[in-house]
Amino acid sequence: MLILNKIIGSGYTRNCYKHPYDKNLCVKIELKPDANSYELHVYDLVKSLIPGQIAKIYSTVIETDKGPGITSQLIRNETDENISPNFHEYKLSGDFKQIEASLNRIIKRVIARDIFFFDFNLGNFVVQTLSNGSKKVWLIDVKSLNRTGYEGFLHLERIFAPLARIIMFRRIRRLYKMVGLIFPFDDLCRKKFFSTLFVTVK
């Protein structure tokens, strides 16, 4: 059993701790039932669709003093090995123009491949500084696939792709507005809107 002491992030459904024996890993402890098992399922679905920009999740559920958890890659800067800042932290001193191309690569794939994520809050993305000084964006939370967070709805967006696109496109545009970037995929959104009727990545 792992003893977890250093919490590095907290959200509605989970707490995230530094792994006690490996600086390149973190342990996610669920606060809501099935949060971890669902993210393991989602990661297996999408890891090849957005290669190299989704934090790796290891498939074994582990026992800790905080309850069952999953182990995930902890993104660190290659230059100083500090934990890479999420968008909230990066916004305080960083220039989002430096990460625009890397963010666009993730978002273009999400839109083009009908990966219906619905949670684009600033804590779900981190900015890694590479050894050459360039910046790379990582998506570190994928559990919002096909889950809007709405309670008590029929959740037809889990079935009908155009409805899912309305919600997802609006939330992505909000992300770009929050970080001061121009959303560059209006044409792609129009092209994709009625391209398929049903959600396929589940």
Image (cartoon, rainbow, N blue to C red):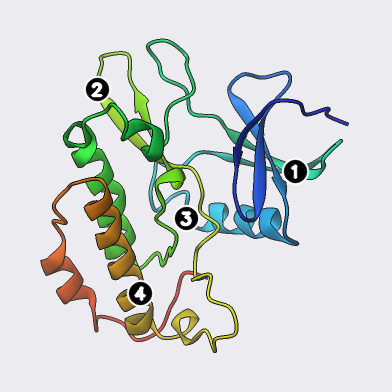
> Would you say 195 lies left or right of 1 here?
left
On screen, residue 150 above or below 29: below
Residue under the image location 55 percent in, 52 percent down? 43
Q: Residue furthest front?
A: 92
| Rendering coords of residue 16 (x, y %) | 64, 38
Q: Which mark is residue 88?
A: none
**Which mark, residue 167?**
4
Q: Nearer the viewer, mark 3 or mark 2?
A: 2
Foreground: disc 3 or disc 1: 1
The residue to which callout 3 is attached is 46
Q: Is residue 17 left or right of residue 63?
A: left
SS class, disc 1: strand
In the image, 15 versus 35, the foreground residue is: 15
Disc 3 crowd, CA 10 A, few/some/many (<14, 14-19, 20+)? some
In the figure, residue 21 lies in which quadrant? top right
Task: State how far apart marks 3 and 1 are (Cα).
Answer: 20 Å
Q: Residue at x 21, y 31 (%)?
A: 95
Real-space Cα distance between discs 1 and 4? Answer: 30 Å
Counting residues from the start of the chain, the first of labels 3 and 2 encountered is 3
Image marks 4 and 3: residues in contact by CB distance under 8 Å: no
For badge 1, the amino acid type reads Gly
Quadrant in which residue 117 is drawn: bottom left
Near mark 4 (Cα within 10 A), the count class, few <14, some 14-19 or many ≥20, is some
Upstream in the sequence, badge 1 or badge 4? 1
Question: Residue at 52% of width from left, 84% of height from top?
Answer: 155
Residue 187, position as x, y percentages in the image: 11, 68
Distance CA(mark 2)–CA(mark 1): 33 Å
Q: Which label is found at residue 134?
A: 2
Identify the residue position indicated by label 1 in the image.
69
